[in-house]
Amino acid sequence: MNDACPDGLGRRFALQRGSAAVATVEPERAVSMNIARILPFPARAVACAATMALFAGLSAPAQARNVRLMESVPDTIRVSRVHDILGNLDMRFGGDSARGASLVRRDVVVKGVGTTKLHDVGDDDRVRPADHDLCARAFEDAVTQLAFAARGARATAIVGVISNYEGTVFDDPDHFECHVGALKAAVTLRAQLAVGPIAPAVVPVISPPVPVAPPPAPIPVTPSPDDAPPPTFQPLPPAPAPSPN
């Protein structure tokens, strides 16, 4: 029976020296061959299989996690600080929302990243946030960058917002694309910066909150003399007239 493992770990190479063939063995395979000679055939096969699995595990590249999610724009706005970040800026999603707008800057691309850090600083969360929470953090970061760009360009609105992950366009007025890994999420947005009034469109709109005027103060009503209630006391009788002396 051949002493070599079935997978060829004990391959022999013939080195011709004149008429004699000297059998040599690779130095790094010597230990495996010695184990194979000592163990019986079933155990030798198991040892060789374990060695092959070890080498395969060391050489196999690590697969990175990359989950593609379609997140709802209105739902993400409700659970994030988008309204506070935008302030007095309007923001509209979907490529059609940029039609007719007076643009001051075109095709602004930003990449937002959401990590497991608490408030972007400090230690990681004790429990890893859900994928949707990481996407909300990445979306918030992307909107923050767009707001800075809009204010720097003196724009009043961010329109035509679409997803643009690695150059691939995803145009949906109700959703944005998010890619989640083991420790962070990424959201890439492309937008147009505009000034002036924006034509109404049937697309998700993030508008600054409209201040609500306080109700007017009640006007005091002075009752008329005819409406005066009757007195609740009895008038005193007239004083008696003084007697003459």
Image (cartoon, rainbow, N blue to C red):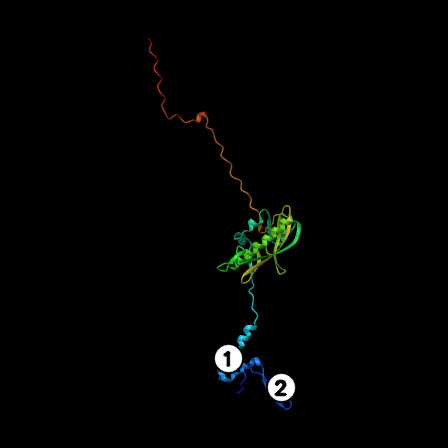
Choose between 75 and 46: the one closer to the eye.
46
Any part of residue 151 in sight: yes
Q: Which mark is residue 15?
A: 2
- Comparing labels 1 and 2, the label whose residue is closer to the camera: 2
Q: Position of residue 26 (x, y in %)?
A: 58, 81
Which residue is painted at 59% across and 55% down in the image? 142
According to the picture, the residue beneath numbered tag 1 turns out to be: 47
Identity, as a three-letter code, of the amino acid under mark 1: Ala
Q: Position of residue 32 (x, y in %)?
A: 53, 81
How far is disc 1 from disc 2 in space, using C-alphas? Answer: 28 Å
Residue count near mark 2 (Cα–Cα under 10 Å), binned few <14, some 14–19, many ≥20: few
Quadrant of residue 138 in the image? bottom right
Q: Position of residue 102 (x, y in %)?
A: 66, 48
Choose between 190 and 50: the one closer to the eye.
50
Q: Which mark is residue 243?
A: none
- Name the quadrant of the C terminus: top left
Quadrant of residue 65 in the image? bottom right
Q: Earlier in the sequence, mark 1 or mark 2?
A: 2
Which residue is painted at 61% across and 52% down in the image? 146
Assign a secondary structure to mark 1: helix
Choose between 103 and 203: the one closer to the eye.
103
Q: Position of residue 67 (x, y in %)?
A: 55, 63
Identity, as a three-letter code, of the amino acid under mark 2: Leu
Any part of residue 174 in sight: no
Which residue is painted at 59% across and 85% down in the image? 24
